[in-house]
Amino acid sequence: MKTKAVRIHGKMDLRLDEVNLPDIGPDDVRIRVVSDSLCMSTYKAAIEGGDHKRVPNNCDENPTIVGHEFCGDIVEVGENWKEKYKVGDKFVIQPAHFHKGSQMAPGYSYSYCGGNSQYCNVPIETLLENCLLPYDSDTYYYGSLAEPLSCVIGTFHAMYHTKAGSYVHEMGIKEGGKMALLASVGPMGLAAIDYALHCDRRPSLLVVTDIDEARLTRAASIYTVEEAAKQGIELHYVNTRMENATAYLRELTGGTGYDDVVCFAPVKPVIEQADDILGFDGCLNFFAGPTDPQFKAPFNWFNVHYLYTHVVGTSGGNTNDMQEAIAMMNAGKLNPSALVTHIGGLNAVIDTTLNLPKIPGGKKLIYTQIDLPLAAIDDFAELGKTDPMFAELDRLCKANNGLWNPEAEKYLLSHAKSID
């Protein structure tokens, strides 16, 4: 069958192509993509082209479909997988299957599978590694955001601590400890705040920093100090565009420093600040992925030796992390709606991806079956003056604290123009 898909042909060369998908055989599963959340990792892949570790170096001859945060419906199942998957079921994909140690992943490496497509054939590696996951919800964008949520969950699980005289790493953030999330009111930072407030291992102190007052204010209106207090957490939002910001952050801990610090920006001063506020046995997770392979920043090695400070880095989550994300969303413990600030159709993918760092706001959510220019939720009211669809979307979002929501998604999918 034919499908429209955005493929990478080389550095900064994305194209909306018509692709002929091979027929489904006994070991194949075909899916219909409904939503895909654009990720900065795809922008990095577009910059690097075939030099990217997950993109084939011959993508100029064999282009691959981009987009790895996607959700939709199973539409055809080969004979060998009919016991596990059913037509009509919904799915999410864990792109990092690591089959036999491979770095290949849907959304980077495959000619017939990626989130910025109408239809896909699922790679056999994804099926063998149980990375095509059942998704029991009628809200597609929650499924798309399960992947970025899994990255945050994996970050929390990768933190570790030790006890004096022991070499055993106790995995996870320190329960009841002090935690700082630096440069963390972008989409992934918001997900981390949500998870820190509602996971089963919570800090007693949570400090969220940034230098953008508007974004801090928005975060504080969504994840409130009062809600955190109900979870037994003392929450502070701090604009670090101030004198002696590092000293102030340490003062919030009573001078002892933080047990867990997550750095969401590949910026040297932020990394140095993260290092400076670590306490005894403090763990720093460098979450932000730099584009410069030679990126370096100073680190206090005296404290490594005498205070047992340490660093971990995570890139993506695993299948268990994604299953946890889905379970927490289904239980109402996590709501990823705050991450979304823009929506668009498949036709908006190329310009949005190639300009992603320049577009303010959080997640850009793509609905792959429709034709729609990228639109900010904040602009719905103005767009609604000439377009009744946006007027109704504006009403639905305002009824949900200004956030994208399941009702808005259902309305959009039933009223937007098809991409065909």
Image (spheres, rainbow, N blue to C red):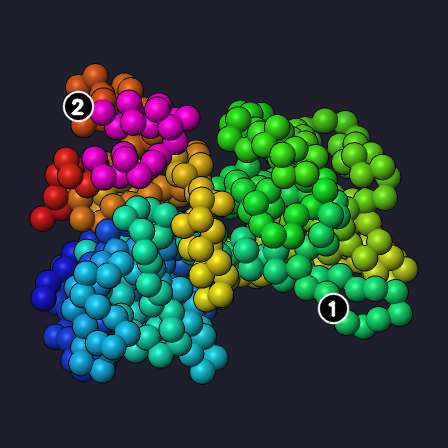
Determine the secondary structure under disc 1.
Answer: loop
For the record, the magenta segment spans 392-411
Q: In the image, what residue occupies the spot 30% across and 46% down?
A: 139
Q: Is residue 122 visible?
A: yes
Predominant SS of the magenta segment:
helix
Q: How far apart are the two marked residues, 2 and 1, measured between alpha carbons?
A: 57 Å
Q: Which mark is residue 45?
A: none
Seen in the picture, residue 224 relative to 167 is either above or below; the reply is above
Give the labeled residue for mark 2. Answer: 387
- Sequence-wise, the earlier of marks 2 and 1 is 1
- Decide if residue 144 is on the left or right side of residue 387: right
Q: Residues within 10 Å of mark 1 (few under 14, many from 20)?
A: few
Query: What is the residue that sits farthest to the top in this orientation?
Result: 385
Q: Quadrant of the N terminus?
A: bottom left
Mark 2 burial class by Cα count in 10 Å: few <14, some 14-19, many 20+: few
Tell me residue 10's x, y (percent).
Answer: 32, 61
Residue drawn at point x = 9 percent, y = 48 percent: 420
Determine which residue is flagged by label 1. 169
